[in-house]
């Protein structure tokens, strides 16, 4: 199994090196564990808190990726007609 980050002492804090893929994998594990119904109320609450932190981390990774795509697309995507007119000149 792929290495995963160790949960911190505080469930709402993540290791800054946690990748999107690691966060998603751990979030999926938490969901499966909670869906099994075998967790105590206290364990469920801790798992939920950890899940919220992981979801926020994933959202941050996705927003960062979106910003990178916007930077890369700047002035690269123009209507086809504009590109055709420039090549005619």
Image (cartoon, rainbow, N blue to C red):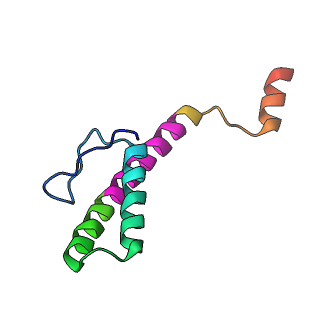
Which of the two residues, 23 or 32, is positioned nearer the viewer here?
32
**Residue 37 position (above or below residue 16):** below
Residue 14 as seen in the image, left or right of residue 28: left
- From where the camera sits, is residue 12 visible? yes
Point out the image quarter for the N terminus.
Answer: top left
Residue 78 as seen in the image, left or right of residue 39: right
**Residue 41 position (above or below residue 24):** below
Q: Is residue 58 magenta?
A: yes
- The residue under the point 22% across, 68% down is 46
Q: Residue furthest right?
A: 88
Which of the two residues, 20 or 9, is positioned nearer the viewer here?
9
Query: Residue 18: image x %, image y %?
Result: 31, 42
Residue 11 falls in which quadrant of the image? bottom left
- The residue under the point 49% across, 45% down is 66
| Residue range corresponding to the magenta coloring | 54-71
Q: Main secondary structure of the magenta part?
A: helix
Residue 12 falls in which quadrant of the image? bottom left
Q: Is residue 85 magenta?
A: no
Q: Residue furthest left?
A: 9
Query: Residue 49: image x %, image y %?
Result: 25, 67
**Residue 69 position (above or below residue 23):** above
């Amino acid at each position: 199994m792929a290495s995963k980050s160790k949960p911190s002492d505080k469930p709402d804090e993540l290791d800054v090196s946690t990748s999107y893929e690691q966060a998603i994998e751990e979030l999926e594990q938490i969901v499966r564990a909670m869906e099994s119904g075998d967790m105590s109320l206290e364990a469920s609450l801790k798992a939920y808190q950890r899940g919220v932190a992981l979801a926020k981390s994933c959202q941050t990774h996705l927003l960062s990726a979106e910003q990178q795509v916007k930077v890369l697309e700047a002035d690269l995507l123009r209507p086809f007609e504009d590109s055709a007119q420039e090549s005619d000149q």
